[in-house]
Image (spheres, rainbow, N blue to C red):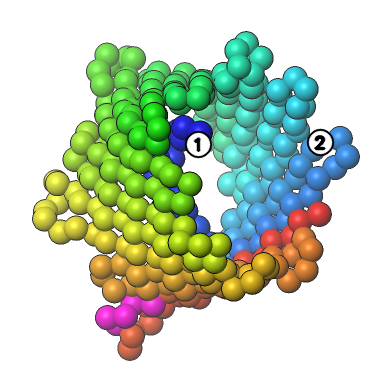
Amino acid sequence: MSIPAFSDISKSANDLLNKDFYHLSAGTLEVKSNTPNNVAFKVTGKSSHDKATAGAIEGKYNDKPNGLTLTQSWNTASALETKIELADNLAKGLKLEGIFSLLPSTQARGAKFNLHFKQPGFHGRAFFDLLKGPTASIDAIVGHEGFLAGASAGYDVQKAQITGYSAAVGFQAPTYTAAVTATDNLSVFAASYYHKVNSQVETGSKATWNSKSGNNVGLEVAVKYRLDPVSFAKAKINDRGVAAVAYNVLLREGVTFGVGASFDTQKLDQATHKVGTSFVFES
């Protein structure tokens, strides 16, 4: 199995616990299309439970023979971003990224340069913010026979000091993964587990402890059940009694519908519950 990036060591469990739960927004609409000249467009719109709306449009051009990807996006906050990726040109497994942003209303600008280097037993990354600080963040994961170990650190060039550090260990197999992470200068600890029981059932859990805020341990558990080839259902609950359920179905080719809800099981008589829907159109 390939070595994940440092931030993805718990990805299987995190995706199961967080993705495809539609109650976070009152409504979500996503439209995707591809052109014959390798340009992919994506338009997204969201309506929050406070009736605020937000949207974004993204265009991505992929030149596979040259390993070049160009992505440009604009959102309703008038933020513009351009991302240039160049993969496997200078060396196999090396990807270079340049990200440039502009917020015209405040003339705020951003410029970032990133490096990704991936080999069979190693995955390293370096992120540089050229206009803020400048700052640098480096992380790496090494793996052998399923065992994973990695660390990350941030550095402020102007202040000449380390701004943060984290560490993680894990194990990955074809049907299950487990990981323990220590973030925020080794003060927040999380243990996660994911298990693909069979082709229909996936389960996962995550326990989190913040050593700075007390002895309480946060716990989440989730399950995903594939009802048939075109639909699945998900459910999760945490130690505070907040539960969420979701249902996703492919209505027809290119049209996916999702609906979800969350409930505070300790306050069923109060208006703390949320319901949300999602439509995704692809062509």
Question: Residue at (45%, 61%) from the top-left corner?
Answer: 197
Query: Does residue 62 appear anywhere in the picture?
Result: yes
Q: Residues within 10 Å of mark 2 (few under 14, many from 20)?
A: few
Would residue 131 be visible to someone looking at this image? no
Whether residue 117 is situated above or below residue 256 in the rendered picture: above
Nearer to the camera, 218 or 228: 228
Amino acid marked by disc 1? Met
The magenta stretch is 263-267
Seen from this angle, which residue lies furthest top?
A: 90
Q: As rendered, which of 153 and 179 lies closer to the eye?
A: 179
CB within 8 Å, label 2 to label 1: no
Q: Amino acid at mark 2?
A: Asn
Q: Earlier in the sequence, mark 2 or mark 1?
A: 1
Question: Where residue 98 sits in the image (x, y, percent)?
Answer: 58, 22
Find disc 2 in the rendering and name its residue: 38
- In the picture, which quadrant includes the C terminus? bottom right
Residue at 23% over, 45% down: 189
Label 2 element class: loop
Q: Residue at x 69, y 43 (%)?
A: 58
